[in-house]
Image: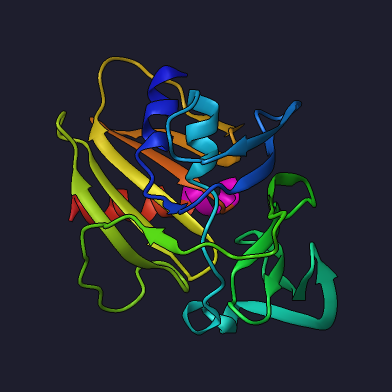
C-alpha cells in the first residue's frame, strides 16, 4: 500500500495560485469515499490531500483531446458561483477510458467542477472550486520533463512525461488530452501476486512479467491496463 501511494504521489500536477477553496470527493478504494474542503492545495497537507492535488487541472484544452475516441456534448448558458459556464459531457466511444463531466468558465476556459466516472458509471473522483469573490486566480503550472513522441503507442494516448527514479524505476505518463495513466517499470523482488484495485481516485494495476514489475496508475479500466502491460512486456522481450 505504501509503495502504491508513493507512486501516485509521483504523478505531475498543476497548482492554482491564490487562496482557492477546492471541494473533493474521491474514491479511497472500491467501497469507500472521502470528502473534504481544502484551501491552498499544494501548500502541504496530508498524503490524501497531496494525492488529490494530482487530480485537479487548470483548464480544459479541447484542442489536445483526441476527439476520435469521444462523443462530446456541450450545453451553454449555465451559471455556477456567478460564472457563465458551459457543461461538457465527454463520453468515450469505447469502454477503454473514463467519462468526464465538466463545468467550464466560458471566458477563461478554466475548469470549475469536474466529475470522473469509470465504464461502470462509478464516480472515481470529483472536485469543484468554491470561489466566493467570483474572480479566477492566475494559474501556475509545474514544470515537467519534455518527451518527444511519435505515433501513438496506445490508441489515442501519447507519452508526455518520462523519468527515471532513484531506485531505477522508469515512469512514463501517457495522455489522450483528457484521461491519463502512468506506467512504472521496475525490477521485481521476490514473489508477487497480480493485483487490480481502486486507490485514491485512480485505478491501479500491478503485474509481474518475468523479472519485471509493471504498475499502471490512472483513468483507464483494468482490461486496458492489462493490454498496456502485455504490449510493453512484448516490446521488452524483442
> Which quadrant is the C terminus positioned in?
bottom left
Which residue does the image show at 50% across and 23% down from the upper left?
Answer: 46
Left or right: where does residue 136 sit relative to residue 3? right
Query: Which of 69/132 is in front?
Result: 132
Question: Residue 182 at x, y = what percent?
Answer: 39, 49
Q: Is residue 238 above or below residue 146?
A: above
Left or right: where does residue 47 sit relative to residue 33? left
Residue extent of the magenta highlight: 221-226
Which residue does the image show at 21% across and 65% down from the upper left?
Answer: 146
Does the segment drawn in magenta span residue 224? Answer: yes
Question: Residue 126 at x, y = what percent?
Answer: 70, 48
Left or right: where does residue 172 sit relative to residue 111? left
Which residue does the image show at 28% across and 58% down from the upper left?
Answer: 161
Residue that extends furthest to the front in the rendered view of this protein: 133
Q: Can residue 179 be seen in this view?
A: yes
Does the segment drawn in magenta span residue 198? Answer: no
- Most frequent secondary structure within the magenta stretch: helix
Amino acid at each position: 500500500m505504501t509503495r502504491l501511494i508513493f507512486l501516485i504521489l509521483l504523478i505531475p500536477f498543476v497548482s492554482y495560485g491564490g487562496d482557492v477553496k477546492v471541494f473533493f470527493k474521491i474514491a479511497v478504494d472500491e467501497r469507500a469515499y472521502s470528502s473534504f474542503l481544502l484551501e491552498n492545495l499544494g501548500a502541504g497537507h496530508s498524503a490524501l490531500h497531496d494525492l488529490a492535488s494530482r487530480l485537479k487541472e487548470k483548464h480544459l484544452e479541447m484542442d489536445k483531446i483526441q476527439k476520435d475516441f469521444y462523443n462530446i456534448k456541450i450545453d451553454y448558458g449555465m451559471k455556477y458561483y456567478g460564472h457563465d459556464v458551459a457543461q461538457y459531457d465527454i463520453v468515450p466511444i469505447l469502454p477503454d477510458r473514463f467519462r468526464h463531466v465538466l463545468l467550464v468558465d466560458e471566458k477563461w476556459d478554466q475548469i470549475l467542477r469536474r466529475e470522473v466516472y469509470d465504464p461502470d458509471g462509478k464516480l472515481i473522483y470529483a472536485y469543484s472550486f468554491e470561489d466566493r469573490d467570483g474572480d479566477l486566480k492566475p494559474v501556475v503550472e509545474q514544470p515537467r520533463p519534455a518527451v518527444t513522441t511519435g505515433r501513438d503507442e496506445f490508441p489515442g494516448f501519447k507519452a508526455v512525461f518520462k523519468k527515471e527514479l532513484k531506485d531505477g524505476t522508469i515512469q512514463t505518463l501517457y495522455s489522450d488530452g483528457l484521461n491519463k495513466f502512468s506506467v512504472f517499470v521496475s525490477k521485481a523482488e521476490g514473489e508477487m501476486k497480480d493485483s487490480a484495485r481502486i486507490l485514491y481516485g485512480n485505478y491501479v494495476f500491478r503485474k509481474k512479467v518475468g523479472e519485471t514489475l509493471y504498475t499502471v496508475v490512472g483513468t483507464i479500466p483494468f482490461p486496458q491496463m492489462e493490454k498496456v502491460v502485455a504490449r510493453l512486456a512484448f516490446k521488452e522481450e524483442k
